[in-house]
Image: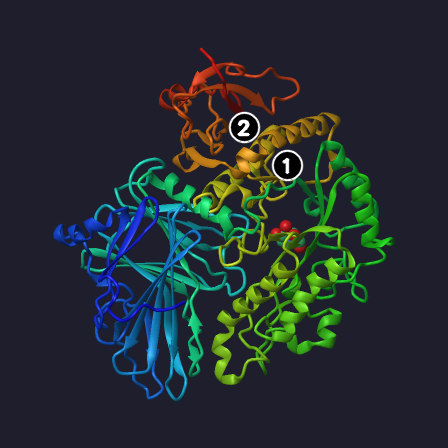
C-alpha cells in the first residue's frame, strides 16, 4: 500500500461507514489521539466534535513508558534493556477498498528504530470498523513484547453497562449484563486450545443504561482470535472506561527479531442506536459477508451419529441411520467419533486419536461403501476427526513421540480418557500432518461433503520440542498461528467442503477460526430448554447460519429432562437444524412428526439462515416466555418462535410484540410444526398489518408446560 507524502493527510481523520464514524487526531510528530466513535458525522462536523468537547482526546493506542501511570496496550523491552515507548505519527495512508476504506497510520518511536502501524478497516454496509496493529523494528537484537493488545477504545462514562458471555462445558455462551463501575473488569480465557467454553472474546457496551434489545446506543467489540485472550475494561477516575482487547500476554512474551513483523488479530467494532439487537444484526451481516466461511450458502439438514450410538459406530447402524434419516427428508449424515484405528481400534475414548484409518472390524466395507449408501438414499456423507490431538496409545505417538506438546523431564499431564495429548501446532511437520489428515481423507474419499473438526483437550503441557528454549513463551500464540496456516491451506484446496468447528462442545466458537469453518457446535448439551439460553447468548455475536442445533432424544442425555419433540424441533429450528439420536428408537408418530418438521424447516430455511434476527423476549428476563424472530431482507417473509419457559396454573403470559416487519405490509400467519393430534392455533390463517403485530403484538395461548409456537408470516398482495 503506497503511503501518502508526509503531512498531506488531514489532521482529523474521519473513518466512516453507512451509519457510524470513528475520528482520530493524527498530527505529524504528535501522539495519535482517539477523538470519537459513534453515530455517523460528516466531514464538516469534525471540528464540532472538539467545539462541543465531545472529543475524548485520549491516546488511540496507549503504550508503556512516558505515561506509565495509566493502563496501556503495549509494553516492550528494547534490545538495550530500555522498557519504554514514545510513539509519534509519521505517516498516514488511506485506501479505498471494495467494501469501504482501509486507513493505516504509521507511528515511529522518537528514539528507537521501532515502528507501529495502527490499522482501521471500515466496512461500509456492515457498519463495522476493524482495528489491529503491526509492529516491526530494526534494533540489533530482538525486542521482547510483553503486552500487545490489538486495540484500545475509550468509552465515555455515564450509565454504561456491559454484556458478555460466560459458561462451562455443556453450559456455554450464557449471558451476563452488569453496570460498569470503578475498577478493572477482565474477560479472559487461558485454555490454550479451545478458548470459548468459559468466556468469549466479545462484548457489548450499552451506553444508555440497562441494556435494551431495540433502543439505546450500543458499542460492540469482537476480538478475532482463537487462542488465549484478555479483554479489559479499566475504569479509573477519568471520564472514560478504558477498553483493551488482545491476545493474553500471560506466559507469552514474544521475542521479535530485527525486521520480523508482529501482526495482532483484529478487533471488530460496531455501533448502533437500535440497542443490542441492532449491534447483533451488524455482526451477523459482517459474519455472513466473510467472517463465517460460506456465510451466504444455505446449510443442509443433518443427522449426527454421536448421541445415537456414541463410540459404538458399526456398519449396520450407520446404514440404518442413513436410511431412516433419508425417509424423514434429511440431507446429510455425519459419522461421528469411533470409526477409526487399526492397530489400536477406537473402542473407548482412551486410544487411537492420530490414527486416521478406518477400523475394518467396525466398518468392513469401508467408507466408500457408506458414501455409496448415502448416495443411494439421496443424502450426503460427512465424517468426524480430531486432528490436533492424539492419545499416548496410538501408532502416531509410537512413530512421532516428539510431536505432542510436552515438558522435558516432567510427567505428561493427560486429558480426556486419561491419555489424550495435544499435538504441537507450532511445528511445521505437525502442521503438514494435520493438513494431511484432511487432505488424505478428501483425496481418498472425494465425496465427503462435511467434516466435523473436534478439539477435546486443553493445552496442559507447556513445552515444545520444536521451539528453541528461548522461544518456549511463543507456544500459546504460535499454536494458533500454526492452526490458522493449516486452515488456510485446507480452504485454498477445498473451498467447498463444509467444516464444523467443535471444541468438545462450544469451545471453538470464535471469529479467530470462523472464516475457515461454516458453522460451530454450540454445546454438547442438547437439552432444548438450556439451549434456549445458550443460543440466545451466542446470537449476540453469531448469526443463526453458523449455529449447529440438534434435536436429540428425550429424556435428554445431559440434563435428564423430558420435553416434547415439537419443543425440541422448535428450538433447534432457529439455527442450522440437525438431529442427533438413533431414529430406530423413535415411534412411528415421532418419525412422522419429524418428517413434517423437516419439510417445514425447508420452507423457512432461507429466512432463518439468511434473514435478520430480532430477539423479542429474553429467557434471561424470566417472564415465563422466550421469543425471537427472523425477517427476510425484503421484509416479505418472517418466522416467529415462542417458547413457554415456566408453567403455572392461571399464569399470565405477556403479549409478544414482533419487530423488523414492514408496518405498512399485511402478513398472513401460518402455524408450522403443529402436533399430529392438534389443530393449529387461533392465529393460523389470519392476516394482520405489520404495524399491529409490532405495536400491539399477539396473544400466544401457550397453555401447557413446554408449549411452543412457530409461525410463518407472508406478506400479502392487495389485501384489504
Ligand atoms: C465432543 C463433541 O462435542 C461431541 O459432539 C462428540 O463429537 C464427541 N466429542 C466425540 O468424541
Q: Earlier in the sequence, mark 2 or mark 1?
A: 1
Q: Mark 2 falls on what kind of element?
A: loop
Q: Where residue 7 sits in the image (x, y, percent)?
A: 24, 69
Q: Residue at x 22, y 52 (%)?
A: 156
The numbered mark at residue 555 is 1
Write down the residue under mark 2.
Answer: 706
Q: Where residue 172 sits in the image (x, y, percent)?
A: 50, 49
Can residue 283 be seen at all in this image of the molecule? yes
Task: Reply above or below: 512 against 141.
Answer: above
Task: Determine whether the beta carbon of the residue marked 2 sits less than 8 angstroms from the nearest atom of ligand 1.
Answer: no
The residue mark sitting in front, 2 or 1, is 2
The numbered mark at residue 234 is none
- Distance of mark 2 from mark 1, alpha carbons? 14 Å
Judge left or right: residue 692 versus residue 194: left
Q: Residues within 10 Å of mark 1 (few under 14, many from 20)?
A: few
Q: Residue at x 47, y 13 (%)?
A: 719
Q: Where residue 144 sits in the image (x, y, percent)?
A: 39, 80
Q: Are marks 2 and 1 in contact (CB under 8 Å)?
A: no
Residue 393: quarter of image = bottom right
Q: Residue furthest top?
A: 720
Task: Reply above or below: 308 against 384.
Answer: above
Judge left or right: residue 710 versus residue 302: left
- Mark count: 2
Task: Reply above or below: 605 against 709.
Answer: below
Residue 389: quarter of image = bottom right
- Observer-nearest residue: 349 or 489? 489
Q: Residue furthest left?
A: 51
Q: Residues within 10 Å of mark 2 (few under 14, many from 20)?
A: many
- Observer-nearest residue: 647 or 258? 258
Residue 281: quarter of image = top left
Q: Residue at x 65, y 60 (%)?
A: 493
Amino acid at each position: 500500500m503506497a503511503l501518502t507524502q508526509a503531512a498531506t493527510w488531514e489532521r482529523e481523520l474521519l473513518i466512516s461507514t453507512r451509519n457510524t464514524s470513528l475520528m482520530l487526531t493524527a498530527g505529524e510528530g504528535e501522539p495519535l489521539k482517539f477523538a470519537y466513535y459513534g453515530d455517523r458525522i460528516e466531514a464538516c462536523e469534525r471540528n464540532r466534535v472538539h467545539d462541543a468537547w465531545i472529543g475524548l482526546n485520549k491516546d488511540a493506542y496507549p503504550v508503556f513508558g512516558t505515561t506509565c501511570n495509566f493502563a496501556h496496550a503495549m509494553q516492550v523491552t528494547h534490545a538495550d534493556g530500555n522498557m519504554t515507548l514514545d510513539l509519534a505519527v509519521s505517516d498516514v495512508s488511506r485506501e479505498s477498498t471494495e467494501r469501504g476504506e482501509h486507513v493505516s497510520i504509521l507511528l515511529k518511536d522518537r528514539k528507537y528504530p521501532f515502528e507501529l502501524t495502527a490499522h482501521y478497516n471500515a466496512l461500509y454496509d456492515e457498519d463495522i470498523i476493524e482495528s489491529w496493529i503491526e509492529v516491526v523494528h530494526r534494533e540489533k537484537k530482538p525486542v521482547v513484547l510483553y503486552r500487545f493488545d490489538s486495540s484500545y477504545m475509550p468509552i465515555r462514562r455515564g450509565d454504561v453497562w456491559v454484556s458478555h458471555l460466560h459458561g462451562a462445558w455443556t453450559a456455554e455462551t450464557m449471558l451476563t449484563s452488569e453496570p460498569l463501575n470503578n475498577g478493572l473488569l477482565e474477560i479472559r480465557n487461558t485454555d490454550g486450545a479451545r478458548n470459548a467454553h468459559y468466556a468469549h472474546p466479545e462484548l457489548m457496551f450499552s451506553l444508555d443504561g440497562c441494556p435494551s434489545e431495540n433502543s439505546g446506543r450500543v458499542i460492540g467489540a469482537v476480538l478475532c482470535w482463537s487462542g488465549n485472550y484478555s479483554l479489559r475494561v479499566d475504569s479509573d477516575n477519568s471520564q472514560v472506561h478504558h477498553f483493551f482487547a488482545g491476545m493474553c500476554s500471560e506466559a507469552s512474551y514474544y521475542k521479535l527479531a530485527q525486521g520480523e513483523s508482529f501482526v495482532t488479530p483484529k478487533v471488530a467494532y460496531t455501533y448502533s442506536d437500535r440497542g443490542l439487537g441492532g449491534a447483533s444484526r451488524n455482526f451477523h451481516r459482517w459474519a455472513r459477508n466473510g467472517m463465517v466461511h460460506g456465510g451466504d450458502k444455505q446449510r443442509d439438514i443433518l443427522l449426527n451419529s454421536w448421541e445415537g450410538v456414541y463410540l459404538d459406530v458399526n456398519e449396520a447402524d450407520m446404514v440404518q441411520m442413513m436410511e431412516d434419516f433419508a425417509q424423514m427428508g434429511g440431507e446429510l449424515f455425519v459419522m461421528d467419533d469411533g470409526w477409526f484405528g487399526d492397530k489400536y481400534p477406537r473402542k473407548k475414548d482412551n486410544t487411537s486419536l492420530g490414527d486416521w484409518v478406518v477400523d475394518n472390524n467396525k466398518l468392513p466395507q469401508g467408507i466408500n461403501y457408506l458414501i455409496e449408501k448415502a448416495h443411494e438414499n439421496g443424502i450426503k456423507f460427512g465424517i468426524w476427526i480430531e486432528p490436533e490431538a492424539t492419545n499416548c496409545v496410538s501408532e502416531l505417538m509410537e512413530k512421532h513421540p516428539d510431536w505432542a506438546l510436552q515438558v522435558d523431564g516432567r510427567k505428561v499431564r493427560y486429558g480426556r480418557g486419561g491419555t489424550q495429548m495435544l499435538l504441537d501446532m507450532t511445528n511445521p511437520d505437525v502442521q503438514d500432518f494435520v493438513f494431511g489428515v484432511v487432505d488424505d481423507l478428501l483425496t481418498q474419499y472425494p465425496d465427503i461433503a462435511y467434516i466435523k473438526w473436534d478439539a477435546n483437550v486443553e493445552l496442559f503441557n507447556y513445552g515444545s520440542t520444536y521451539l528453541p528454549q528461548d522461544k518456549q513463551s511463543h507456544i500459546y500464540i504460535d499454536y494458533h498461528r500454526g492452526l490458522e496456516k493449516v486452515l488456510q491451506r485446507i480452504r485454498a484446496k477445498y473451498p467447498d467442503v463444509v467444516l464444523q468447528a467443535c471444541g468438545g462442545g462450544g469451545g471453538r466458537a470464535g471469529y479467530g477460526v470462523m472464516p475457515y469453518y461454516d458453522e460451530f457446535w454450540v454445546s454438547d448439551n442438547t437439552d432444548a430448554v438450556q439451549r434456549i439460553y445458550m443460543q440466545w447468548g451466542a446470537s449476540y455475536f453469531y448469526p443463526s447460519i453458523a449455529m449447529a442445533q440438534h434435536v436429540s432424544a428425550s429424556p435428554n442425555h445431559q440434563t435428564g429432562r423430558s420435553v416434547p419433540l415439537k419443543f425440541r424441533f422448535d428450538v433447534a429450528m432457529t439455527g442450522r437444524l440437525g438431529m442427533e439420536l438413533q431414529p430406530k428408537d423413535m415411534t412411528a408418530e415421532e418419525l412422522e412428526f419429524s418428517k413434517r418438521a423437516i419439510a417445514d424447516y425447508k420452507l423457512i430455511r432461507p429466512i432463518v439462515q439468511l434473514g435478520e434476527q430480532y430477539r423479542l423476549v429474553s429467557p434471561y428476563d424470566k417472564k415465563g416466555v422466550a421469543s425471537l424472530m427472523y425477517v427476510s431482507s425484503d421484509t416479505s417473509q418472517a418466522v416467529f418462535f415462542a417458547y413457554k419457559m415456566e408453567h403455572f396454573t392461571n399464569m399470565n403470559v405477556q403479549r409478544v410484540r414482533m419487530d423488523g416487519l414492514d408496518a405498512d405490509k399485511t402478513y398472513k400467519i401460518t402455524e408450522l410444526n403443529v402436533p399430529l393430534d392438534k389443530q393449529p392455533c387461533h392465529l393460523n390463517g389470519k392476516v394482520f398489518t405489520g404495524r399491529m403485530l409490532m405495536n400491539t403484538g399477539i396473544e400466544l395461548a401457550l397453555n401447557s408446560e413446554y408449549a411452543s409456537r412457530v409461525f410463518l408470516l407472508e406478506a400479502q398482495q392487495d389485501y384489504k
